Amino acid sequence: TPTIGVLALQGDTAEHLRVLDGLGVTAVPVLRAAELDGVDGLVIPGGESTTMSKLAARYELMEPLRKHIREGMPAYGTCAGMILLADRIIDGTADQQTIGGIDMTVRRNAFGRQTESFEGRVAIDGVDGPDVDAVFIRAPWVEDVGPGVHVLGQLTDGDRADRIVAVRQGGLLATSFHPELTGDARIHRLFVDMVKGKV
Ligand code: GLN
């Protein structure tokens, strides 16, 4: 069984640990650089990306995270975690750093105030069965992607139609929404299969 870490600086770490636990992998919180050596993959939770990147800098995790990702550690970012995996961001704070890794531009708080939180159904490439129930909480969307990035999911309704909300590049996966909050473990299972090298 693989060991999957969940970055525990800030955000909904516990929910991810619970879902991963339910999938039979060894799920551990990660707070120190040395702990990255012991994991086969890493989940970066939702929360507040500016706070998370400040804390990552303070815990001296930024460079170790970048190094592990460069060297091929699979990672899955949800919401703020998606922002952290983006090579470029729009509407970040002036000094906001990302770990990077996915050749995409992400617009932070993209859905705006009126629709800070909403729920929608999204078809995700690589996830069988009914569309995924997706919870968006002050979520980002993906503004554009480079040629190596596979778009896995886009919204279909009204104003938000075509907005990209799920992507994959090699071993890196990111969603604008929070599957750890809905009880549907299929996207986590996809990530576990990526970590196992099955997909
Ligand atoms: N708006 C938050 C940010 O910019 C993300 C919100 C979330 O993770 N639910 O980091």
Image (cartoon, rainbow, N blue to C red):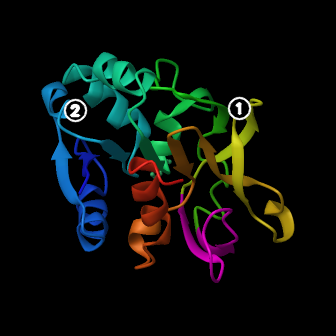
Secondary element under disc 1, as helix, strand or loop, is: loop
What residue sits 36% from the left and 18% below the top?
A: 67
Q: Look at the numbered discs 1 and 2 and tell me whether their residues touch, using CB distance below 8 Å.
A: no
Residue identifier under label 2:
36
Q: Give the quadrant of residue 57.
A: top left
Task: Tell me which amino acid carries mark 1.
Answer: Gly
| Left or right: residue 152 compared with residue 185 | right
Q: Nearer the viewer, residue 192 or 164?
A: 192
Q: CA distance from mark 1 to mark 2?
A: 25 Å
Is residue 20 depicted above or below 30 in this figure? below
Q: Position of residue 30 (x, y in %)?
A: 19, 41
Expressed as whole percent of the image width and height from the top left, the position of residue 81 reads: 44, 44
* Residue drawn where x is 70% and y is 70% of the image: 123
Q: Amino acid at mark 2?
A: Leu
Depth check, front residue: 113 or 119? 119
Residue 74 image offset from top left, x and y in percent: 42, 40
Q: Decide if residue 16 is on the left or right side of residue 97.
A: left
Q: Where does label 1 land, which residue? A: 148
Q: Is residue 158 above or below residue 52?
A: below
Q: Quadrant of residue 142?
A: top right
Q: Residues within 10 Å of mark 2 (few under 14, many from 20)?
A: many
Establish whether ligand 1 lies closer than 8 Å to the Cβ of label 2: no
Q: Residue 146 placed where, x, y %?
A: 74, 29
